[in-house]
Image: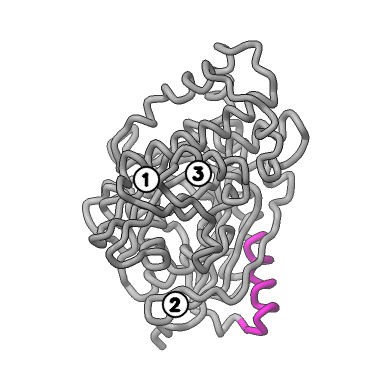
Amino acid sequence: MSPDRDGWFIGLMSGTSLDGVDGVLARFPAGQCTVAHHAAAPLPPALRAELLALNTSGPDELHRAALAGNALARCYGAVVQRLLEAAGLQPRDIQAIGAHGQTVRHRPQAFDGTGYTLQLLNPALLAEATNITVVADLRARDVAAGGQGAPLVPAFHQRVFGQAGRAVAVLNLGGIANLSVLRADGSVLGFDCGPANALLDHWCQLHTGQDYDRAGAWAAGGRVLPQLLQSLLDEPFFALTPPKSTGRDLFNPAWLAHHLEKTPAAGAQDVQATLAELTAACCAQDVRRHAAGCALLIVCGGGAYNAHVMQRLQALLPGVRVGGSQQHGLPPLQVEAAAFAWLARQCLHGESANLPAATGARGPRILGAIHQA
């Protein structure tokens, strides 16, 4: 039986911020996106710590990575069950699950010219647990085709947020910030801007014990340290021409500590204020460079709820209206999960989903590996 083009899909996303799993139940009639239900679950602290540790080399890491993939599949399965119960649906009612997995290494084009991107997950176990077809490993084919494997969401952003004859920019503030530029002529550019919640959350957890800086209030009470900010902005990644992508391989606590050595008297709250300014500054810089003439910036991801960063973005982009994606039909925490539901749909129907202009791949590719129910 061929898949129903307008049937139900589930998208599951656990991002670089490591704050938990977001899942949506969605369908895509006539190219539109309709989300019926959203469910979220925090990662168990031990699993979160292990996934964070696996971002760097360590003892017995192949064994540990395999078990972490199993544990994440079980977390994903619990979110799927919540979505099914909320909708009153059975596994047979779902066409497929698009499951991102947890990125622990992202080194496209490195080492041998191809490089790799690695998302931990056991998709076969997820298919067994849910009795639903799973589409996973969604970045690898783009990397094999010479691309970055990221960002994959610009094609989805174009379908959901694109406006005919009008330039729109979409900024995802997850662990890493990535920008989609939806041009008035229908062409699309997408790339990673730099760090967002990955460093902000790390510093907040380290110095306050809180998982994140709620609404950016702690950062708002600090002062930006100009010397530290300039040192951070001197990172060569920010000057690279797209396509480009990044992750915790670069923007991690060791990177921050290296720069802090040059500012030894920095207070913890002032560092948080400076990290918030770094996020806003690098994103605003990319909007000015690559989205000139754009009058609208739609922000999604958890960072859309950081009122301080949103205010700084607006201040740095006075000619652009900055607002959360909830004002445009899709709440910030649902956008990426919905994108992976759409990527599963594309794979099942044998349709390409990457944008070579965004990833640098040699051409359009069908993304994902299918694990049948």
Observer-nearest of 86 and 292? 292
| Magenta stretch bounds | 75-90
User: What quarter of the picture does the N terminus occupy?
Assistant: bottom left
From the image, state whether disc 2 or disc 3 is nearer to you.
3
Task: Specify the label residue 28 is tagged with.
Answer: 2
Q: Is residue 326 left or right of residue 163?
A: right
Is tag 1's residue or tag 3's residue first in the polypeptide sequence?
Answer: 1
Do tag 2 and tag 3 residues touch (Cβ < 8 Å)? no
Q: Which residue is mark 3?
A: 314
Above or below, 259 against 167 in this view is above
Q: CA distance from mark 2 to mark 3?
A: 32 Å
Residue at 63%, 68% (x, y): give it: 38
Which type of secondary structure does the marked residue at label 2 adopt? Answer: loop
Q: Which residue is mark 1?
A: 191
Amino acid carrying mark 3 in the image: Gln
Tell me if residue 87 is in the magenta stretch: yes
Q: Is residue 112 left or right of residue 40?
A: left
Query: Residue 18, position in %: x, y?
Result: 62, 46
Amino acid carrying mark 1 in the image: Phe
Do tag 1 and tag 3 residues touch (Cβ < 8 Å)? no
Is tag 2's residue or tag 3's residue first in the polypeptide sequence?
Answer: 2
Residue at 58%, 13% (x, y): give it: 263
By secondary structure, the bulk of the magenta-drawn segment is best described as helix
Q: In the displayed orientation, state which residue is furthest to the bottom.
A: 1
Residue at 66%, 54% (x, y): give it: 71
Q: CA distance from mark 1 to mark 3?
A: 20 Å
Above or below, 251 against 63 in this view is above
Q: Residues within 10 Å of mark 2 (few under 14, many from 20)?
A: some
Amino acid carrying mark 2 in the image: Phe
Query: Residue 347, position in %: x, y?
Result: 38, 69
